[in-house]
Image: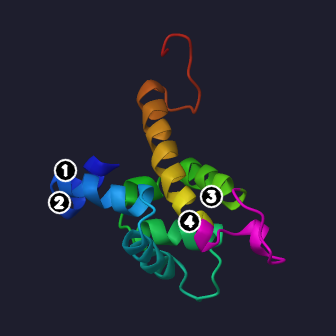
Amino acid sequence: MISLITRRKGLSARRCDNLFYILFFTQIVADKELRKQLFSQFDPNGNGFLSLAEVDKGVRDVLGLDDIFDAKPAIMRAFQIAKNVTKSKSSVGDDYIEFKEFRYFLLSLRQYFEYYEAFSRIDAGDDKRIELEEF
């Protein structure tokens, strides 16, 4: 994923590593603010919840990562993981991602995209199955 952003945005690999570290991994208050800004860009209606459609659109429009946008299984699995991380106090929260779950979504998206890419490289027949010969 870092190499994809490096290619698309013309960023150095070191700068991308720093960007991902800030967005995904740290718990520092300033970094949390960056994630809040990103969350608000993903949440165009400002209701504090992200639907799968908003997440899908955010990956394409906010992050600008077409390769990940095309990896629908990775987005869907990351969404499912993140929305179930915490129990919501809201009546609709269990079906959506709240800010407190957003970091988990980003982490999961990165991981599931790597799985998706690895699987795609092995699946030479492009039939969404790995045959014994491909393995």
Q: Nearer the viewer, residue 31 or 40?
A: 31
Which x, y percent locates residue 17?
A: 27, 52
How far is the residue under mark 1 from the one under mark 2? 6 Å
Which x, y percent locates residue 115?
A: 49, 37
The three-letter code of the residue at mark 2 reads Leu
The three-letter code of the residue at mark 1 reads Ala
Residue at numbered disc 4: 102
* C-beta proximity under 8 Å, tags 1 and 2: yes
Residue at numbered disc 3: 79
Query: At 15% from the left edge and 55% from the top edge, which residue is drawn?
Result: 12
Which x, y percent locates residue 101?
A: 61, 64
How far is the residue under mark 3 from the one under mark 1? 26 Å
* C-beta proximity under 8 Å, tags 3 and 2: no
The three-letter code of the residue at mark 3 reads Phe
Magenta stretch, residue numbers: 85-100
The question of residue 37 being in magenta is answered with no
Between circles 3 and 1, the one closer to the viewer is: 1
Residue at numbered disc 1: 13
The three-letter code of the residue at mark 4 reads Phe
Q: Nearer the viewer, residue 11 or 33?
A: 33
How far is the residue under mark 2 from the one under mark 4? 24 Å
How far is the residue under mark 4 from the one under mark 3? 9 Å
In primary-sequence order, the first of circles 4 and 1 is 1
* C-beta proximity under 8 Å, tags 2 and 4: no
Residue 77 lies, with reference to residue 23, above or below; the image says above
Q: Secondary structure at mark 2?
A: loop
Q: Secondary structure at mark 4?
A: helix
Residue at numbered disc 2: 11
In primary-sequence order, the first of circles 4 and 3 is 3
Q: Residue furthest right?
A: 91
Between circles 4 and 3, the one closer to the viewer is: 4
